[in-house]
Image: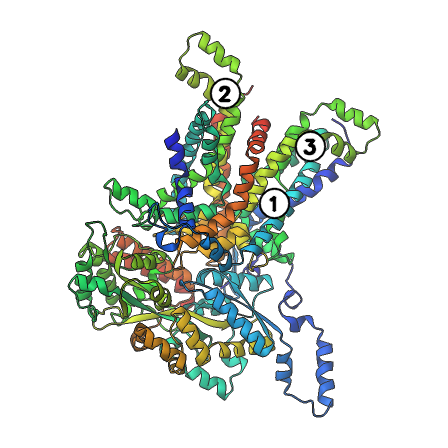
Amino acid sequence: MWLFGLLWALPLLYAIWAAVHPPLYATEFELGSPVTLGNFARAWHAAPFARYFLNTVLLVSFTVTGQCVLATLAAFAFARFSFRGRDLLFSALLLQLMVSPSILLVWNYREISWLGLANTIPAMGIPYLGSALGIFLLRQNFRTIPTELDDAARLEGCSLLGRLWKVYVPLSRSTYVAFGLTSIAYHWNDFLWPLVISDSVTTRPLTVGLEIFATPEQGVQWSLVTAATLLSSAPLLVAFLIFQRQFVQSFLRIGIR
Amino acid sequence: MTGIASSLRLPHRPRPHTARDRNNRENTMPVISRRTAVAGMTTAAGMLAAPAILRAQQVKELSFYYPVTVSAPMAAIIAEYCERYAKETGISVKPTYAGNYQDTLTKAVTAIRGGNGPQFSIMLTADIHTLQALDVIVPLDEIGLDKAARDWLASFWPAFMFNTRIGGKTWSVPFQRSVMVMFYNKAAFAKAGLDPDHYPTDWKSQALAAQKLTNRQGSAPMWGIELPADISNGHWTFGALCGSNNFDLMNDAGTKVFYNAPKAIEALDYWVSLSKTYNATPPGVSAWPTLVPSFLRGDTAIIVTSTGNLATITANAKFPFDIALPAGNLHPGSVVGGGNLYIFKHASHAERQAALRFAQWLTAPDRAADWSTRTGYVCVTQPAFDTPTMKAYIEKNPAAARPKSFLPAAHGELSTFQDARVQTVLENHIAAALSGNETPAAALKAAQAEADGILRRYQHA
Amino acid sequence: MEQHRGAWLLVLPAALFIFAFTNIPLLATLVSSLYTSPIAGHGGGFVGLDNYRDLLSDPSFRTSLVNNLIYAAVTVPASVILALLMALGVNAAIPGRATLRLSFFLPTMLPMIAVGAIWLFFYTPQYGLVDRFTRFIGLGDINWLGNTATALPAMMAVAIWKQAGFFMIFYLAALQNIPPVLREAASLEGVSRFYFFRRVTVPLLGPTTLFVMVTAAINAFCVVDHVIEMTQGGPDNASSLLLYYVYQAGFRDWDLDTAAAATVVLVLILGLLAAGMFALFGRRVHYR
């Protein structure tokens, strides 16, 4: 098992090796070769990674927050209310679990252009704002919340949204964490749709920035490219390292029913 | 050719072009106030400047996309040029790095269709027909060429004007131009008993030399020669091989290709034989990005790549090297490549003129020489070669003088309508031939058939 | 369950976005695949299944389709089995399991583009790690990305490396949800570990396996970042996948009819897969 784990980590370790060694030593494996952080500095300056970072953070914040809000509202309705066409609507929305908006990129690109939103940061997140996965998970969780709590809140005179906010949301924390983390990871790493939508440095996220930086056409200095790669992935990796326990726990708790 | 928005068959909201064209400042200003301003100034005696200049002076910002495909610090250099231009003229030119040539084309056209595209861009010279078909570019003649501009256009090397003139008009300005050349390791040549000062000039001796240089045993295995065959580069290599067979792969109009002509088949036969018969090159497809690192590490003795890599190799090679024209069946020959500056149709008259002036500034002899010494691209004009900067550079790096002599023997790059697709068809079949899945003749015949299918609709247009 | 007129309003925003960017585009793509766009201002109109006929006669498309099916057939089982093995390994009380878990899961946190860049380096002939290894064991130089025979397997390896760790987490959760009392009862009755695994653990992992398989299958058809980064579909379409074909048709060739038709085929396959998997395995899945 240990060997397996080591083998699995090998590509990443190789990349780290190349990133911390000067170009000449990047591809040899002499243990005594000089270690340097210069590649990271050069990579940082070779392309506007600071801006790419900002764009990505903005994009992910916008998208995930929007998803949580919209999904909460919808999941509440599906979980606790009956209305005409409810089940049909739910099934229709579940289509998105299978067909991600990025597959329909040609048509979605047209829609975004019509709205005049091409090459903007929100445009990269808008198609995803309605999240079938979020609705599905939250609905599942909301249904397990005892109705007594809900009734108690209603008796206290809480409005619809009040009940939602006071009873359902706090009791679904682990679902929010699990969904939030999954969504953050997904959108931080999303590539194809942002590639199509973003045309300039002010909107380009890290993934697209990295791709054009590492495009094979360049003479390819692997130390530079691996340094840039690690720079782009660092925040997510670091966040995961810090929050791994919570991350794994929340997955354990939501389970697959 | 259809554009995304115009291809809809279903009812759609028509896009109001001018209102959404954010970069197009002229159009966001109410027409009336502009006319009033001009009328007012005309009546003010003594303040008369030609209306064109006046309107041009109102352009304060331009933006463009550019690709980086060689290992030179192009982003930094271009940023520096734009800063200098801003200081000299007060016009802020904003460069955006857009990836490789294909990415840059896709992004520029996508942005234009989305309503906020750049006013000009640096794109593959050979994409001229594709761009024409997409109806996004405007010829320089339409923008207005005075005598100075016409002299300037005449100063460009004829080889670099291939793929830029259609229908008697000039559609783009050579900027980052290159020739495909052989970089060879002189130390390795000497070690193998070959003359390091004279690169082989015919196909057979080139193959034999590569064979001699190949040594797969031992602790430092070396390949004799490597040629790039991957997607978006394979066609260029093949173009060089055909160029060295004195053959052009397409017609001037960009409507026909001649993939399965006997001379082309000869070229591919030769290429395949380098691995099959002479064992001098790795079988299969060699990728462009691995060539320069390979050469610098001493893993390959000869590489076929762009002069654009000259600066990096000069800076990093730990052994003596030189560049030479690819050996030819009849005599050495090659193919030109690289990018030109295209001005877009959607830009206003003033913006086009401003872009044209920027192009002239960018390719002025001193700047062209500076560009060439820092990147390895070839000086696009003769006057650039004669500047003191270039002369001093050549003294220190004699290899830099060679491209000038290569130009007369260089052919135009493969350029047709639906460029990318037609090139990929060729590259796919070259890959098949190099992998041994198809014979060269069969591969090129299939490629010709596919290309004919793609180009058919343009042949009677 | 209560009735409330406001319930519809709650659902409206999310539904709006989903309809606008998934359901309607899907329908629109389907409809537009039955038309052709005008060329140079003339032609165009309803053509029924002509676009599909042209699609099937395009060798590039056929290769992409076959490639994708093979790709899915390999990456799905491989990812699932590896994920289960990883979960079993990490679940056992061995020292350093947190590091092990980290090592398996990290690839999932990286963007596919980064994974592509790293593996591009990994696969480089001559000094790439893989090539050094094959030379070390005597297999010689293999140009993984430059050979029609090895390009697709190379892409498969990248995908499996990226996603197995993610699935491991789900298996881990499911394993930890198996009540230990079952294990105790089994050991009391002298049942072998392998028997227990086969007859108890695996069936109980049924729902997870189904979920993981469907996700892996969807990924196999919807993730092409690594193809864009590493091989651009080459050499000779050896590593071209369906969605990559759609991307090329739509954004390189500006051929929207082909892109639409190919997208419809892609969605059909996804639908069939999901339906098929649920039908086939749904019955055998044991819910508690």
Whichever of callouts 1 and 3 sits on the residue coming sooner in the sequence is 3
Residue B276 versus residue C131 in the image, above or below: below
Q: Tell me which amino acid carries mark 2.
A: Leu
Q: Chain of mark 1?
A: A
Cα distance, mark 3 to mark 2? 29 Å
Q: Are marks 3 and 2 in contact (CB under 8 Å)?
A: no
Residue in the foreground of this view, choosing between C30 and C44? C30
Whether marks 3 and 2 lie on the same chain: no
Which residue is situated farthest in the left direction here? B193
As rendered, which of A198 and B316 lies closer to the eye? B316
Residue A138 appears in which quarter of the rendering? top right
Does dot 2 land on a helix, a strand or a loop?
helix
Q: Quadrant of residue B62?
A: bottom right
What residue sits 49% from the left and 11% below the top? C184
Residue with the most extreme bottom position:
B45
Query: In the rendered image, which residue does mark 2 sit on?
Result: C204
Answer whether residue C272 is visible to the viewer in this image.
yes
What crowding class fits label 3: few (fewer than 14 Cα within 10 Å), some (14-19), or many (20 or more)?
many
Q: Which mark is residue A78?
A: 3
Residue at image coords 76%, 22%:
A148
- Residue A128: image tag: 1
Q: Residue furthest top?
A: C189
Please report, as a chain letter, where disc 3 is located: A
Secondary structure of the residue carrying numbered label 3 = helix
In the image, A39 versus C15, the foreground residue is A39
